Amino acid sequence: MTQYLVAIYRPEKYDPAVSEDAAMGREISALNQEMEAAGARFFAGGLMSEWTAKALRLKPGGKVIVTDGPYAETKEHIGGFWILECPDMDAALAWGRKAAIACRADVEVRPFVRSSATRSAPPQVR
């Protein structure tokens, strides 16, 4: 079975203490339980705010520079994610729709590459 990343996007400087209420917490918890019961949830986790991130940038000559903040300078950042095991992209998208509703946020669904040694074409998306 293929593994899929279901990533939740949050706006810059998102504060869960202000933006998330008890109803949202219950909906996310119920979704997690539903994923577990279906055998789809492999791993799930939330991320601290983007300002806690460190970015490592590769420079010429193999030098690596560490800077404060996220790597991508965007208005949205990944706030949390699930790694799901699903039979196909359609099943992963069905979970992604439920995640968008429960989290009240935009979601990205993307399949994992099995390994670099056996890398093949990505699954077809309808």
Image (cartoon, helix red, strand yellow):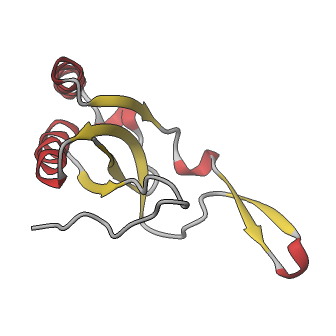
Relative height, residue 40 to residue 13 (above, below): above
What residue sits 19% from the left and 67% below the top?
Answer: 124
Left or right for 92, reference 12: left
Instruction: Name the image quarter holding the N terminus.
Output: top left
Q: Front-most of 13 and 5? A: 5
What residue sits 29% from the left and 29% below the top?
Answer: 41
Q: Which of the 4 image quarters holds residue 121?
A: bottom left
What residue sits 23% from the left and 49% below the top?
Answer: 105
Instruction: Name the image quarter holding the C terminus.
Output: bottom left
Q: Front-most of 11 and 35? A: 35
Left or right for 40, reference 79: left
Residue 4 screen position, x and y as percent:
32, 47
Residue 8 screen position, x and y as percent:
32, 48
| Residue occupying the far front of the picture | 118
Q: Front-most of 33 and 106? A: 33
Residue 58 screen position, x and y as percent:
77, 71
